[in-house]
Amino acid sequence: MSDLVARWRDRRLVGAPTRAQTLAYGASAFPANLLTQTFSAFVVYFYVDHLGVAAGWVAGAMIAHGILNAVLNPLVGACSDRRRTRWGRRVPWIGLGIVPLVVAFALVWTPPDLGPVGLLVWFLLVVAVFDVAYVVVVLNASALFPEIFRTTAERARGNTPRQVFGLVGMILGTAGAPLLYGTVGWPGMALALGVVSLGFFAWSLVGMVERPVDDVTVTEREAAVGLRDQIRYTFANRAFVTYVLGSLLLQSTSAIVLAAVPFYVRYTLGGVEADATLLLAPVFVAAIPSIFAWSWVVRRLGPRTTMLWVVAVYGASTCLYLVPSTVLGAAVAGLAVGVGIAGLMQVLEVALAQLIDEDERRTGLRREGMYFGANGFVVRGSVIVQAVVVAGVLGASGYVEGAATQPADVAAGVRLLLGAVPVCLAALAFVCFWFYPLRGRGDGDGEVPVGEAMSDAAASPTVGDPLPR
């Protein structure tokens, strides 16, 4: 038994990952998206409508959840970057966080018999554990992506099963959860999803393999970099700043589209609430095969050029929502939107991995944790952008909360919210990615080796020790 543990502990990846490792690593996206999509879609409904907690209290708790999640990302990322163990840098975090993550998710849906105040306290405590465990597991799993897959071609191929698994998790989290809690109840749903997630996470550990690092100097330098220096140097990187601003705009666009669909169905198309599913389903249907197509594009054109094409396709596709007057027509438009969303899922992490490679070329350190953590911190702002834009457009069009009928301008306002606002944000994202300085493109099959210079100019200023070599 001890020999088995030692072999598992000391395993390291040399060369390209196998197909089995690639599939296992990608499988981690299924439970991650299944859990978070179920939580995001139904937790407010469960605590407000089913348990009777005041909506304002739950809203405040969700704000606290968002702030905690955002702050945890760079903190966990920096800690992960600084310490190597015999088990590696990322794998110990992942292994230790899986069980608390699944247990905390189950406890969210199985509260004890308490009054409203007690339920709110329960919610805050359990969701805090869920947040910590989720960031610990998912951020470290994401940080392994640039390390496991070392070239643009490997990353485009390796990201494909991961994003497909993630999409399936999102679909089941949205559509499968209601079927479960409607038949076996909320505790039954929590147990079923928890067991399935635990199984997929266990499988994914097969693919969570780190590469060997024999240079003791590198390990010492990693441990010496404090949080303040990590943050300072990361946000001084011009490549990262242009990338993360573009990513924030695109994430905000997707958030606005999802939030606007129910209003669009009811007030613009004249449909019923259930028709929102008919608008969202084609997006997912088109996205799954499109991920494979965008993988080919990334390998041929490189990350930056592909990002520009993706943003153009995504922005243009959202404009189609300006045209339909029926639910069926809007569903057809959703097919085009799904193609754009698939491109975002495929290229964004490949581009982030590219700038991490460039950072290593300049600093001698692999800082995947900090870059993914800082990215997670910034893109959480998409929730704020979504809230401000949706509220602003609805208010300007005369929308009245809870009214049986709405002014005529609401239909036009919602149509613009879904079909015009996203393209404006996408245009701003296009500008950000246009100034993204890493213009490397692989030769032949698209390979861009780690450590090779890929920028046409210095990606960021040198800001002083201890990071720059």
Image: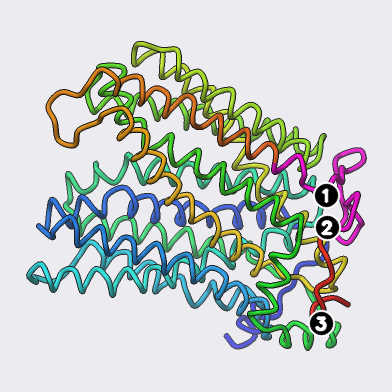
Secondary structure of the residue carrying numbered label 3: loop
Q: Which residue is mark 1?
A: 438
Which badge, 2 or 3, comes first in the chain's sequence?
Answer: 2
Q: Which residue is mark 3?
A: 465
Residue in the foreground of this view, choosing between 262 and 212: 262
Left or right? Give the position of 2 relative to 185. right
Q: Amino acid at mark 3?
A: Asp
Residue at 63%, 45% in the rendered image: 246
Q: Nearer the viewer, residue 6 or 257?
A: 257
Q: Position of residue 62 (x, y in %)?
A: 31, 60
Question: Gap in Å between the C-alphas at discs 2 and 3?
Answer: 17 Å
Q: Check disc 3: other Cα within 10 Å, few if <14, some if 14-19, many if 20+.
A: few
Where residue 54 sits: x, y (%)?
Answer: 13, 58
- The residue pinned by badge 2 equals 459
Q: Are marks 2 and 1 in contact (CB under 8 Å)?
A: yes
- Give the residues in magenta: 432-458
Q: Is residue 432 above or below residue 341?
A: below
Per the picture, the main secondary structure of the magenta-coloured stretch is loop
State whether residue 59 is above or below residue 155: below
Q: Is residue 445 magenta?
A: yes
